[in-house]
Every structure is written in structure tokens, then in C-alpha cells.
Amino acid sequence: MRSSASQPALGALAQHMLRAERKGQGSMRPVRSENDIKEIRNPMKNILRRVPFYAIHGMSAHVKAISRSVSRDSLLSNNVSEGTVTEADMLIPDVLANQGCTATLALVVFSVLMGAINFGYNTSVLNTPEFVIRNSLTEGYVDDISWAFIVSIFCMGGLIGSTIAPPLLDTMGRKSFMSYNAVFLTFFLGLEAASQSVMMMVFSRFCIGISCGGNTVAVPLYLGEISPVSLRGSLGTLNQFAMVIGILLAQVLGKPLGFDPGWRYLLALGGIFSILQLILACYIVESPRWLVMQGEAGKAEKILRSLRGDADAKYVEIELESMQDLAEEEKQEMSVTSLVRKPQLRFPFMVGVCLQLFQQFSGINAVFYYSTGFFQNAQFAKPYLGTVLCGAVNVAATAFAVELMDRAGRKPLLLLSALGMTISSLWLTVALVASEHFDVELGIFEVSGVLCYVIFFEFGLGPIPWAITAELFGGVERATAMGACSAVNWIANFIVGLMFPAMNGALGSFTFLPFAMVTFLATIFSVKYVPETKGKTLSEIREAMQPKKDSIDSFEDPESTSTDSKAMRGVF
């Protein structure tokens, strides 16, 4: 069936990753001796404890930076001269080279990514068949306000789902939570497909949002907890890739199933992925980290050995010890209030929150929610083609962005993304205004403006806010900061989804002008306040942020401004 078209793509990616890992293993150094293992045990544990337990898109460079920093500190502590430390010496090869993707891990990852595909699919599934659905419900034609609420209520469900997921994940365990969540999602996808009224659609969509919001927390967390440290960035990329494939799949199927009652089958097709996840649940293992948190280190070690395959038992032992150490540290609780009150955390938290606001208020989800209607109102001859092209370039840009994030820094990409989106929005606005006032066909320019807008988003404002937020915080405060940023993201997403139809009706050809203003502000903000985090440790990032934080603190409290901070305010 067409609905499973994304599975071969994900399988091919997983196989490519597996071949790459095996290729890397073919040239790795010999396994160290028992004495060498003793020498690097503490540095290895330090690395494993400092890398976030999240699968985050673009995190590979951060892992390497931590490895270099810990290796350098270890060598220097052993009286090795700073000038004699080489790049090869600074990397502890056993941490990265001996951690590949086993068949067991690949199968587990494939199963879990069904949740990510479902999130993307349900984000965009109402886009293409919008006008068919609006004419098919019992109330007659659904007005703009009601339709906007049907679309955007998904985000309010996502907010609730992402809020209740962490305590449920800790109570139930990762495996049980994802299984029950898949059952919950399957039921409400069926209810949505059978909806006869606006209220029934709203309720179903809200509950689907709860499930998908839970998946946005559970999937990257679980992937980070089962994967070796060297693969967390790659698996974060697969997670992102699964989401955008889900978006594209919904857009492609929207045309052939865009009739009454075909749209009902379209909505129900998302259940294939959740059912497949349930079928494969027998292969999903419990998170070793969660088992350690429950005091079941023996079970955790057994699962780690199955996931790591032929890895030396000593490495598994060291990984388990690092999890046990972290379990003790993470018993400390950090509230959002503490993030705001502590001076060293307030500024990084502000940066993370602002980046999430810029991401959503850039209007990207207005494209994935309403592009078909937007192109139709703009009198583009083939609105379905425009929507599918948006989904296709979204997938292609996501794949290309992986290479860029590993090579370029976070800040240059963020600036390129925000400035590029600003120019694309202005380009689109000029094309729409010219088409309307001069009665000329500029559809190709309108579509190309939207496509460039989507491409630039995926290069920076899409993945980088999440990567930077994870890199700005240590282990104790990271979960709280990312949870708060996630809540801000869902709320902003809801506002854009709810307001865009009214904004489009009121502004017409100037609809994307407010988005251009937001992305331009994002450019200025990034220049002034966003630090470069690629290749840097947490202490280096905090040190780089200190002048910017001081300038804000002095602005907020003029009476405490010193001569140095006044001068710094003039710079920033």
C-alpha cells in the first residue's frame, strides 16, 4: 500500500547508517588492555555522563567536543605537556569507535520511529483535503474559525501530552508508555475518521495531539537512552527525518484520497504506523537507564549487552556505571522558577525560549497546515502540486541540513536561515502583490518563494533551537529547560494555526509580511545574543555567553551597572 512508502526509505537510511558504522569499525584501533581500560575508565564515564540522554538532530559535533575536552583534561592531569597534545591524543577512540549500530538496535529504532512518522503525518493530514472535509460534515460548510480550531487544537493536545509524558514515562517505563500510547492513538485516529460533526473532529484531533505530544518527548528520550553515545546525533536525525517523511506522505496521499468518503480513509491510515509499532512491541526493550533508575541494574546490563552486540564487556560495565552515577545526580529537582531565578541559568533559558518563539512565529506550520488553501486563494493553477513540492523540499533540506550542521556552526546556520526566510517572505509578498495588482500570472514565483522559505527553515530555525537548548544546559537542569521550551513551542504553534486563516483573509497578498518581520527580528537576536555551541563544552559556552548576559542584567538593573558593564552594553 502507498501508506507504507516511508518504511523503505527509513530502512534504507538505517542500512546506510549500519554500513557506515561497520566501515568505521573496520579501521578502528585494537581493543585496549585491562590496564588501559583502568586508565581511561574515569574519562569515559565523564564523557558518557556529560552527553545528553536525548537523540537530537545535529548533536554529533557536540559529542566530539565533549570527548576532546575530557581527553585533553585527562592527559594534562597525567602531566602531559599542553603543547604535545595532538588531535589523535585528545579523542579516546574506545568511546566512539567501539559503539556501532547492531541489528537489535536497528530493529528497535525502526519500531519506535513509527511514532515520529505519525506525528508528522497528523500534523499535515488535513492540509490537502481541507475543502472536501469542510463540505462533508453534517453542519454543512465549516467556517474559517471552526476549521482553524479543528486544525490548531492538535497543538493544545500536544502541549498536554508533552507535559504529562515525563511523569508517566518515569512511572510506567518507556516501553509501556509507548505501547499504551500507540493503542490510544489508534483508537482516536479511528474516531477522527468516523467524525460527523465539528465537535467530534475537535475532540478526536485534540486526543491525537495528546498522543503525538507524548511521542515528541518519548521517542527522542528513548532513542537517546538505548543508543551508544556516538549514535545519538544520527538517531536524532532519523527521528527528524521520520517526521518530515510523515508530513510528505500525508500531502502526497491527500490528492488521491481527497474526496468524500476517501478523506476518512486518509485520516485512518495513520493507524497503520501505530498498529505496526504494536506488532513490533515484542522487539522493543525497556530503557536500560530507566531500569537503573528503578534499581534493576542487572536487567539493565543484560539489555545493554544485547543492544551493544560484540562490544567489550568492560565498555558495557562503564556505561552502566555512568547511568548509575547520573541516576543519583538526577534525583535533584529543578523547577522553571529556579531557571529564572538563578543568574547563570536565566540568560540561557531566555535564549532557548526566544528561539522557540521565533521558530513557530516564523509561520512555518502555517505552510504545513494551510498551504493548499493558500495556493488556491493565490490563484495558483495547481495548489496540490505546490503543497507536495513543499513537503518534498522539506525532506530534501532536512537530509542536506545534517551535513551542514556537522560542518558549519550553529550560529552561522541560524543567521543564514532567518535571513533567508526573511528574503523569501518578501519575495513571496512582492510576487503576490504584483500578481494581484497587475493581473499577471506569477505562480512559479509564488511557489518558489514558499519553497525557499521551507528550505531555509530546515537549515536553521527548524533543528537548531532544539540542539542549542540541549547544549546550553547541564544534566540536572536540561530536562526542565527543554520541557519549558517545548511548552512554549506548542503554545506558539497553536496561536499560528488558529490565527493564520483570519490573518490570510485580512492581509491577503501581505500575509507573509508579519512572518518576514519575525524572522528579521530572529536574525538580529541571533547576532546579539545566541552563542556558538558547536564544538564547545558547557563551560566554554557559558563563558562565551557571560558578556551578553551581563549586558542584559545591567539593562534590567541600571543602579547595579558598573563601568565595564556599561561599556559592554555599548558593544552589544
Image (tube, rainbow, N blue to C red):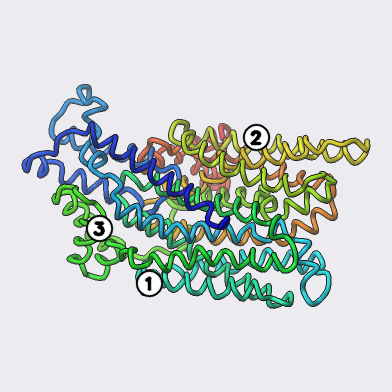
Outermost top residue: 83
Image position, residue 365 (x, y; %): 65, 53
Q: CA distance from mark 3 to mark 1?
A: 21 Å
Camera-nearest residue between 271 and 413: 271
Quarter holding residue 291? bottom left
Residue 238 horizontal side relative to residue 68, left or right: right
Q: Identify which amino acid the numbered label 2 is placed on.
A: Gly
Q: Is residue 566 above or below residue 272?
A: above
Say few, some or many: other residues with alpha carbon within 10 Å of mark 3 (under 14 / 14 to 19 / 20 or more): many
Q: CA distance from mark 2 to mark 3?
A: 42 Å
Residue 40 horizontal side relative to residue 199, left or right: left
Q: Is residue 353 above or below residue 21?
A: below
* Rendered residue at 90%/35% (across/down): 440
Q: Identify which amino acid the numbered label 3 is placed on.
A: Met
Residue 215 horizontal side relative to residue 14, left or right: right
Outermost right residue: 438
Q: Which residue is mark 3?
A: 323
Residue 420's mark? 2
Q: Is residue 13 above or below residue 269?
A: above
| For the residues bearing labels 3 and 1, Cβ distance under 8 angstroms | no
Image position, residue 136 (x, y; %): 78, 70
Q: Identify which amino acid the numbered label 1 is placed on.
A: Ser
Q: Nearer the viewer, mark 2 or mark 1?
A: 1
Marks 2 and 1, the one that precedes in the sequence: 1
Image position, residue 134 (x, y; %): 78, 67
Q: Which residue is mark 1?
A: 176
* Rendered residue at 78%/36% (across/down): 444
* Rendered residue at 24%/25% (across/down): 86
